[in-house]
Image (cartoon, rainbow, N blue to C red):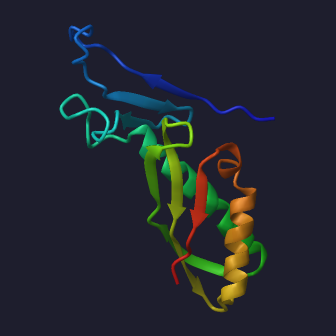
Amino acid sequence: MSEYTATVYWQRLGAVFTDNKYSRAHEWRFDGGVTVPGSSSPHVVRVPLSDPSAVDPEEAFVASLSSCHMLFFLSLAAAQGFVVDSYEDAAVGVLAKNEAGRLAMTVVTLRPKAVFSGKAPTAEQLAQLHHRSHDECFIASSVKTDVRCEPVA
């Protein structure tokens, strides 16, 4: 068993607060020393109460799924002798009402594109690499969201 931590820090900075017109900007602090600006999504809380330049929880959710998939993909490709030169995923998450009528991230679609040196995997091998990556991804195994993978050739 492993534990992972993040500290989320927010301050009122003199806003009235009870009028619900306070800034949603905050920080995510990680154990390695990285601090990431966070905010509510401008799709959920209007600017200037949200900071569109910060990472919102919905974006972080999509990035987390994409990153986990990629890390397993790279490991599995290396184990099979394939050399990956680059990997890019233009992942998209959809916030919509779920079957209970509540807003949720209902679908996340990964669109990974890997570029290989030397011998590249066949279409079948590539599909299998992505399938195994999805099956082994800790984050995908932790959510109810429909996580789809549509590799880009």
Residue farthest to the right? Answer: 1
Residue 22 screen position, x and y as percent:
24, 18
Q: Position of residue 130 (x, y in %)?
A: 67, 71
Nearer to me, 81 or 132: 132
Say how many tags the image has: 0
Q: Nearer the viewer, residue 144 or 35?
A: 144
**Residue drawn at the location 52% of the way across and 56% of the way down:** 108
Residue under the image location 67 percent in, 80 percent down: 126
Residue in the foreground of this view, choosing between 12 and 150: 150
Percent coordinates x, y for residue 69 in the rendering: 63, 60
Left or right placement of residue 28 versus residue 18 in this view: right
Tell me if residue 133 comes above or below residue 41 in the rendering. Answer: below
Which is nearer the eye, 134 or 103?
103
Q: Is residue 77 visible?
A: no
Q: Position of residue 79 (x, y in %)?
A: 78, 73
Which image quadrant: the N terminus? top right
Please name the residue shown 47% across and 30% down the image.
29
Quick check: can you spot residue 99? Answer: yes
